[in-house]
Image (cartoon, rainbow, N blue to C red):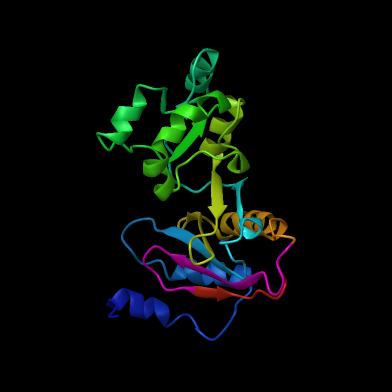
Amino acid sequence: MKHGKKYSEAAKLIDRATQYEPAEAIALVKKSATAKFDETVELHIRTGCDGRHAEQQIRGAVVLPHGTGRVTRVLVFAKGDKVAEAEAAGADFVGGDELIPKIQNEGWLDFDVVVATPDMMGVVGRLGKVLGPKGLMPNPKAGTVTMDVTKAVNDIKAGKIEYRLDKTNIIHVPLGKASFSEEKLTDNFNTLMEAIVKAKPSTLKGQYLRSISLATTMGPGVKISTAKY
């Protein structure tokens, strides 16, 4: 794959054979962000899990201390008093049955996270084929199926992110923006790694975290040492 001049220059800063300590990796990733926009810093973790087994599925959520640097649009499925509660908490969209055709037939997806009260999951379930493949289906483990709508919306707006295994047993999550200070990115990294280490399935045999790397949207990957994990 042919890369542009900026990518090639940035890649020269990084020794691909080296596994860096987190602080060093974060400094290198910031230096390698050369795009004209504020790139997202992404964390990629290859695990030894086999997601085909339910007990080895990893899914959870964590509030990053400094957020992700992007505005997250929240859709809440609620009824009764919970509609006003969701609106007061700052949800971008709130509704019920009337949103089904809009999403199903019109392809409306102008939101990043979906929250639902438990009594609305029968309605939301009808959108499984649309929301599921996009990773937007509310889930109790991620704190997005809850009666505490205020907390759910506040946490998401404050920088809560969800982590889960993809089909190749890798976790991909945003860590912040390249414009963040090294200290902020380090805080976010440590908070996220702590949550993922705690999420290790008890049935897993062998190595849990096989490789960890950081990269910006357009930049090269930087490997992080897995030794301490």
* Residue plotted at (45% across, 27% down): 123
Q: To which quarter of the image does residue 141 belong?
A: top right
The magenta stretch spans residue 211: yes
The percent position of residue 58, horizontal first and vertical second, equals 61, 56
State the residue lying farthest toward the right: 202
The magenta stretch spans residue 9: no
Q: To which quarter of the image does residue 229 belong?
A: bottom right
Q: Nearer the viewer, residue 132 or 212?
A: 132
User: What is the tally of numbered marks visible in this picture?
Assistant: 0
Q: Is residue 1 visible?
A: yes
The percent position of residue 175, horizontal first and vertical second, equals 52, 56
Q: To which quarter of the image does residue 192 belong?
A: bottom right
Q: Which portion, as a residue range, is magenta?
A: 203-221
* Residue plotted at (45% across, 48% down): 135
Q: Is residue 187 positioned above or below 227 on the image?
A: above
Q: Is residue 75 visible?
A: no
Q: Nearer the viewer, residue 107 or 89?
A: 107
* Residue plotted at (48% across, 80% down): 14
Q: Is residue 152 left or right of residue 127?
A: right
